[in-house]
Image (cartoon, rainbow, N blue to C red):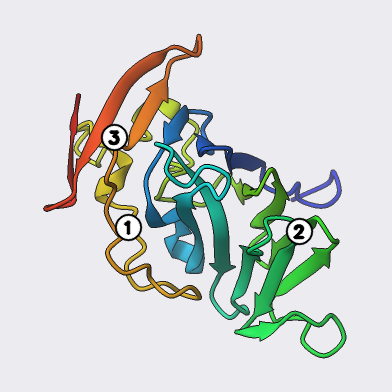
Amino acid sequence: MQTGGATPAPPVVCGFNGGDPHLVTLDGLAYDCHGRGEFFLTKVESTQGEVQVRFEPWSQDPSGPFTVTTAMVAREEGSSVVQVTLAASGSALEILVDGETYDEAANPGTGVMLDVTSSQVDMLFLSCMEISVSFANAMLSVEVNVPRPLETTGLLGNNNGDPVDDWMVCLGIDQCVFDFVFAGEAVGMATLAGLRACGVPACVVHDRNGRNARKCALHTSANKVSEV
């Protein structure tokens, strides 16, 4: 019998995507991803939660060797689809809810609470998944908070508290995240034709001291990776 008040809420852990792009998984593994196209930042099978991001060349250096985040879309079972896109100017956010321009009074969304300012969009879904999207220097930053009991896949790892296995399959075989994070059929964004595979070395893992520990390169023809 419970005597100490309400049952405490499950711990919520944070993953991050920003810069060119830098990522930190829900379990704290830091790495860089210079992929180009659309990827699952995280998927939560038990809630049908999905957070997708679009990586494109930086508008201020389009011929450069890296990409930045320009759009994201999120939903879970029974909720509205929320899309946040960096405007072409790089200095504003465009927000769609179920394909329509966001209007707090006319179209507030279903199964998700939105808090919108000129520079940031915060989302809270019924599962307690939280997402914060902001922009600076013509690129988006996306912070995702997921309750610890929820198992995840995607660029933000598996949410089991162990950063060591964020790049492992169930048999313990080390594999790069790109084997299972391609968005394919986007939930709210049109898939970029020809950009579902990376054309540059894709990702670099950092060890606890910030050094480059290993690098994965994506073989575009077969969507397979190998360490280099």
- For residue 171, which quarter of the picture? top left
* Residue at the spot of label 1: 182
* Residue at the spot of label 2: 122
Give the class, few, some or many, for how many residues have Cα within 10 Å of label 3's Cα (few <14, many ≥20): some
Asked whether residue 42 is in view, the answer is no
Q: Is residue 88 above or below residue 25?
A: below
Residue 159 position within the rendered picture, expressed as x and y whole percent measured from the top left:
49, 41
How far separated are the C-alphas under marks 3 and 2?
32 Å
Residues 119 and 75: in front is 119
Q: Earlier in the sequence, mark 1 or mark 3?
A: 1
What residue is at 49 percent from the left and 27 percent from the top?
30
How far separated are the C-alphas under marks 1 and 3?
16 Å
* Residue at the spot of label 3: 201
What residue is at 44 percent from the left and 32 percent from the top?
32
Asked which secondary structure carries label 2, the reply is strand
What residue is at 61 percent from the left and 84 percent from the top?
98
Identify which amino acid the numbered label 2 is placed on: Asp
Q: Indicate which label's residue lies in the foreground, 1 or 3.
A: 3
Residue 62 position within the rendered picture, expressed as x and y whole percent measured from the top left:
47, 47
Residues 173 and 182: in front is 182
